[in-house]
Every structure is written in C-alpha cells, then in structure tokens.
Image (cartoon, helix red, strand yellow):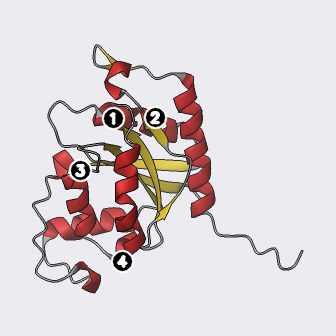
C-alpha cells in the first residue's frame, strides 16, 4: 500500500526559498514507489489566525478552512515540515496551522527539511519540540538541515550536493518504518 506524505511549506514570505526545498523533497518522494506526496503551502492556504470557537481538542470544527485542513492532515500517513528558521524559532504561520488541530497530530510521524543560516534551521526544529511533545507527534530522524540555504538557489533553481539527497533518502526510510505497522515477532 502506498503511504501518503504531506509536505507543509512553513514560510509565507514572498522571497522565500521554501518552495524550492519542498519541490526538491517532493521529487525525492515521487521517485520512491513506497509513497505519494501532497504539498500544503501555508502561503496559499492563507489560514486566518486561529478563529475556531471551541478548543481543538474537542474536534468540533465549525469553519470550512479548519475542516479542510483537518482532513488534509488526518489523511496523511506522515507529515514533513519544510521550515525556515525565523529569529531562532519556527514560523508563526506554522504554529497557527498546528494550533488549529489536536487529534489529527496524535502519533503522526513528523519529518523535517529545515533550512536557514549557520544552523540550517535546527534551532527552529528544536523550538518546535515542546509543541510536538504536547500533541504527541512522533519526530523521526534523520532530518534534512540545510545551512546557508540561499547559496544553493541559483537563477531560480535549487542545486544541492548529493549528500542532502542521501539524507533525504534516510528520512524517507525512517518515515516508512514509522508508518508501517510493527511486526509481531512474538511467534519467532
């Protein structure tokens, strides 16, 4: 059975490079017959600041944009956040998108393609840890962290060294393992 990976582009800035990194990772996913991919671009989704009347833990979503977002996340077997680092943390649009939902995140395998300056977005990933813990998201490793991310975008094209592709393949293997049911070895 083909597993569904949702890529969430966490930057909404007009000058972002997140779209390049999401396209690059989506191509890696598409070349692997274990998976299919969907991209959720937070800029295109344009979710308003959290405006549901009830707390997400009740799952009583009233607004159409929340219902659509909930179904997108619910139907994914795993989520990969394609995320920059803003002021040593993750983006406000990503936090807003996460905050809309509750049960949909429970036990969901989460991967990362992070990018930024010297840290490659790792501080953004680390700052997301308490949120992931609270929502019982299951982070998988390795993560793809691209330092000095702008240097790899030349004339509108992303050109990454092969080592990033190898790490991306490792992330796909980890997601596959996290998604797949644990085999019962008690009979062995």
Along the line of sight, the residue nearer the viewer: 176 or 84 = 84
Image depth: mark 3 or mark 2 in front: 3
Q: Residues within 10 Å of mark 1 (few under 14, many from 20)?
A: many
Secondary structure of residue under mark 2: helix
Give the label on residue 27, or none. Answer: 2
Distance Cα–Cα, label 1 vs label 3? 12 Å
Q: Which residue is mark 4?
A: 103
Could you say where residue 188 lies in the image, as x and y percent from the top left? 90, 74
Q: Residues within 10 Å of mark 4 (few under 14, many from 20)?
A: some
**Does 90 sit left or right of 184 as displayed?**
left
Image depth: mark 1 or mark 2 in front: 1
Q: Quadrant of residue 175?
A: bottom right
Q: Is residue 47 visible?
A: yes
Image depth: mark 4 or mark 2 in front: 4
Distance Cα–Cα, label 1 vs label 2? 21 Å
Distance Cα–Cα, label 4 vs label 2? 29 Å
Could you tell me which residue is drawn at 59 percent across and 61 percent down? Answer: 178
Could you say where residue 148 lies in the image, as x and y percent from the top left? 36, 27
N-term mark: 4 or 2: 2
Distance Cα–Cα, label 3 vs label 4? 22 Å
Q: Which residue is mark 1?
A: 116
Q: Which residue is mark 3?
A: 91
Do the CB atoms of the residues marked 1 and 4 lie less than 8 Å apart? no
Q: Is residue 33 visible?
A: no
């Amino acid at each position: 059975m083909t597993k569904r990976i949702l890529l969430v582009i966490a930057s909404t800035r007009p000058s972002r490079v997140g779209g390049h990194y999401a396209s690059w990772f989506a191509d890696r996913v598409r070349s692997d017959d274990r998976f299919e991919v969907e991209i959720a671009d937070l800029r295109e989704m344009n979710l308003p600041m959290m405006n549901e009347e009830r707390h997400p833990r009740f799952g009583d979503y009233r607004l159409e944009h929340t219902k659509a977002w909930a179904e997108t996340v619910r139907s994914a077997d795993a989520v990969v956040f394609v995320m920059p680092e803003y002021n040593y943390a993750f983006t406000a649009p990503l936090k807003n998108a996460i905050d809309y939902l509750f049960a949909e995140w429970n036990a969901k395998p989460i991967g990362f393609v992070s990018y930024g300056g010297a840290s490659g977005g790792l501080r953004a990933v680390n700052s997301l840890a308490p949120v992931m813990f609270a929502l019982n998201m299951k982070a998988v490793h390795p993560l793809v962290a691209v330092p000095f991310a702008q240097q790899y975008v030349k004339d509108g094209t992303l050109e990454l060294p092969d080592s990033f592709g190898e790490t991306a393949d490792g992330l796909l293997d980890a997601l596959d393992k996290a998604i797949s049911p644990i085999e019962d070895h008690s009979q062995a």
